[in-house]
Structures are given as structure tokens and as C-alpha cells.
Image (cartoon, helix red, strand yellow):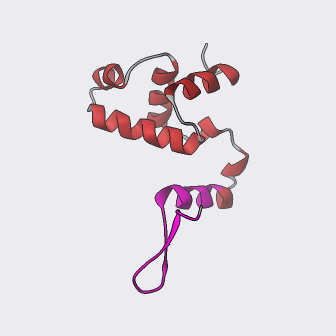
Amino acid sequence: MAKAIRKVAGGGKYITPAVAEKLVDEISGNANKAPHELLSKREFEVFMFIARGKTVGDIADVLSLSVATISTHRTRILEKMSLKTNADIVQYAYANNILR
């Protein structure tokens, strides 16, 4: 969290987008939701592809998006869900009975 808040030139504070989103979630009551419920529709779609073992390139082809865009979604998914790897996504999906 110390890295998340930085002083700005005029003595103000800067909050990273990830921290801002967490603060909004707390205020709006999203803190009680499961991590996957905080994902946007597109992020959840990418999450499901990753959970099923698809690569970023595979997902980009299926969704007609760039690999960079899918990588950005993956990064946001990992951040929002406090996960580190694709294996963590797969494990989470199975543990929470999301894959059917």
C-alpha cells in the first residue's frame, strides 16, 4: 500500500487506479462479493478462457482482439482477484465451481 500512494508535486497525494477501484468497491458494498464477481463482462469472458487453458493468443483470435488487449485484461483480472498466475485462475475457477 505504501507504493500505492505517492506525493505529487504540489504536496497532494496520488492513488493508483487499482487502489482507487478497491476504495470504490469498499464504499459501494462490493467488498462482500466474490473476487470474480468484480470483473467486467469482458474480463470475466477472458477469465473463463484462461481457466479453460486457452493462451492469450488463442483468446485474441477468438475474440478478434489484439494480444496486447487480452494481456491487459489478464493483468486487470489478476490484480482485481489478487492472483499471480494463470494457474491461480484455473485453481480459483475449480475451487469456486465456476467451470462446468
- Say which quarter of the image contains residue 95: top right
Closer-to-camera residue (40/53) = 53
Residue furthest to the bottom in view is 10
Residue furthest to the front in view is 2
Quadrant for the C terminus in the image: top right
Residue 13: within the magenta? yes
Residue 16: within the magenta? yes
Residue furthest to the top in view is 100
Write down the region rendered in magenta. Answer: 2-25
Compared to residue 84, the image places residue 31 above or below, namely: below
Residue in the picture at 47% in, 59% down: 17
Q: Is residue 56 left or right of residue 97?
A: left
Residue furthest to the right in view is 32
Q: In this view, does 73 lie to the left or right of 38?
A: left
Residue in the picture at 60% in, 35% down: 36
Q: x, y percentage for residue 79?
A: 52, 44
Residue in the picture at 46% in, 36% down: 43
Q: How many labels does the image show?
A: 0
Compared to residue 70, the image places residue 22 above or below, namely: below
Q: x, y percentage for residue 59?
A: 36, 23
Closer-to-camera residue (1/72) = 1
Q: x, y percentage for residue 5?
A: 53, 68
Quadrant for the N terminus in the image: bottom right
